[in-house]
Structure formats: structure tokens, C-alpha cells
Amino acid sequence: MSAVKSDTSFGVPAKAAARKAKERFSVSRTLRYLVLLFFLLVVLIPVYVLFVTSFKGAGDAAAVRAWNLPEVWILDNWKGAWDALSPAIWRTVQMVVPAAVISSFLGAMNGFVLARWRFPYSDLVFTLILFGMFIPYQAVMIPLLQLMLGAGVPSGVPSLIILHVIYGIPITTLIFRNYYMSVPEELIEAARVDGAGMLRTFGSVVLAISIPSFVVVLIWQFTTAWNDFLFAVFFSSSQNGPVTLALNNLANGALLTNYGISMAGALLASLPTLLVYILLGRYFIGGLMSGSVKG
């Protein structure tokens, strides 16, 4: 009987401690959800204003009524924004897709060489490549413009493709190098035993396992090139420039008369990047962290 009482007496504090721990966990989880909900609202409130204003008429889209729903829901703003931005959206697609793909493949090749081929001053080369990430665009814009004009590169899409490829190489090289440092050495050695050289190993073995990193750099490069405005101002015009430049011209022309068309244009311009993150976002964090163990 004494033994039973002893077990019972020890069981009560244990149950109480477990209950308190469960309560603390519940409170902590609730606080985390509240914080996440707060930041979600902070992000979505501007989106709400953009969305409802894009359906308002010229007289209804006023700053004092920004929070109000439209008195009459109209689609004229969206039609006007599409007519104004659709040529620039197509030019942006023509610019962004090649720039993202080319810079991704160049970064993959650089990352593989720097991760698996040790040559003299390889660490210095890698450092110099990364140095390009920390050079502000504004510091080199004038000499870069003179260089592009001297080389005879046409303004607009061709110039922007070259610039985004060049400025995308440092970040893509870093991501791919870190990823390839985590690839098992036995896999590379097996390809060498089978007689594959460096290029054959890269093309037949390494590229096949590089999908996570390609997803990361493609999303990154696509978003960076799509949202760029500084290069667009210097190296293109309203006739051959990307959607960010066309959106700026649309907003300047419509801001004093109709907020709705500029809001609809902003949503149209951001829709492609939003779709990319919706379709590929779940792979982004996994791919970004896939090479974080080594490197």
C-alpha cells in the first residue's frame, strides 16, 4: 500500500508539470500566430487599397475614400492599364526570361568549377566574383552607359539582358557553389572512374541534381530583373523599355486625374512575379537551404 501511495504522490506533480508545460506551449503558439497575423495584415492592407481603388471611377478614387469600397465597380481602369502596359509587359518577358536562364547556367558552371576544381588563386577568383554583389549600381551607371554605347549595344531589351546577366552572375555563382560543396564527393569520383571529364560530369551528372538551386536562382533573377527600374531608366525608353518604366509613365500621367488606372497598372505589373512565387515558392526555401550545410 505504501508503494502505491508513493507512486500516486509522485504522479500528481508530474501531471501538473505536464499540464503547465502544455499551457505554456499553447500560449506561446497563440502569441506566434498573433504576431504572424499582425504582419500579414500589415502586408495585405496596401494590397486591399490597391485592389479596391483599381475598380473605382475617377471621382470615386480619392485619397479620403481610399478605404471605402467602390460605389460602382468598373473595369475601365484595368482595360486602360492593360492597353498601356501590355506592350511593355511582353518586352519585359523577352528580357527577363533569357537573362534569368543565361545567368543561372553561367552561375552553375562557375559554382561547379569553384567548388570541385581547385586551381591556383581559386579563392581569390571567387572573392572577386562576389565583390560584384557589393558594388552599387549608381556608382558605375555612367561608365557602364558609356561602355554600352561604345560597344554599340542597342538600347532596350538587348542592353538590359546583358546587364542583368552580368549582375546576376555573383549571386548565382554563390548559390551554386554552396550547393555543389554539399554534393557527395563519391558521386563526382564515380563519374571520373567511368571516364567522364569535367564538362561531361557537369552536363550528365551535376545538372541532373541541381534542380533545387536552379529554382532558387531562377526565381531570384526573374524577380530582380522584372522589378528593376534603375537600369530601365538609363538603358531604355518608353518605346522599348520594360514594364516598370511604362508603369512610372502611366502613374505620372494618371495620378492627378485617376488613381484607379495607376493602381490597376501596379497590380498588373506585379502579377507575373506573384504567380512565380505561388507556383514555385514552396521550392524556394528548400532550394535555398539545400547548400547551407557546407560552403
Image (tube, helix red, strand yellow):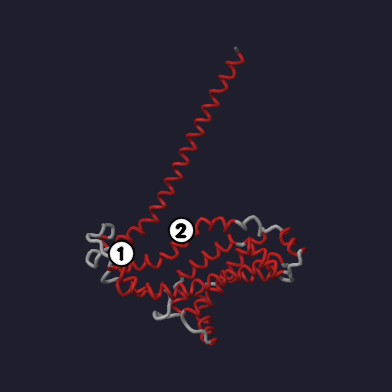
The residue at the point 41 percent across, 64 percent down is 271
Residue 178 percent across, percent down from the top left: 64, 61
Residue 76 percent across, percent down from the top left: 27, 68
Q: Foreground residue, 180 or 137? A: 180
Which is closer to the viewer, label 2 or label 1?
2
> Where the C terminus falls, by quadrant?
bottom right
The residue at the point 37 percent across, 67 percent down is 266
In the rendered view, tell whether residue 227 sits above or below residue 49. Answer: below
Task: Name the secondary structure under disc 2.
Answer: helix
Alpha carbon separation for disc pair 2 and 1: 22 Å
Q: How many C-alpha atoms fall within 10 Å of the one at disc 1: few (<14), some, or many (≥20)?
A: many
Task: Name the secondary structure under disc 1.
Answer: loop
Residue 100 percent across, percent down from the top left: 53, 70
Residue position for label 2: 278
Q: Is residue 42 left or right of residue 63?
A: right
Image quarter of residue 118: bottom right
Q: How many C-alpha atoms fall within 10 Å of the one at disc 2: few (<14), some, or many (≥20)?
A: few
Residue 173 percent across, percent down from the top left: 61, 67
The residue at the point 57 percent across, 22 percent down is 10
Count all numbered tags in the image, as a single digit: 2
Q: Give the mark nearer the N terminus: 2 vs 1.
A: 1
The answer to whether the residues at label 2 and label 1 have Cβ atoms under 8 Å apart is no
- At label 1, which amino acid type do we have? Ser
The disc label shown at residue 272, or none: none
> Where the N terminus falls, by quadrant?
top right
Q: Is residue 237 left or right of residue 116?
A: left
Residue position for label 1: 54
- At label 2, which amino acid type do we have? Ile
Image quarter of residue 88: bottom left
Q: Foreground residue, 199 or 262? A: 199
In the rendered view, tell whether residue 108 sits above or below residue 152. Answer: above
Q: Is residue 7 left or right of residue 187?
A: left
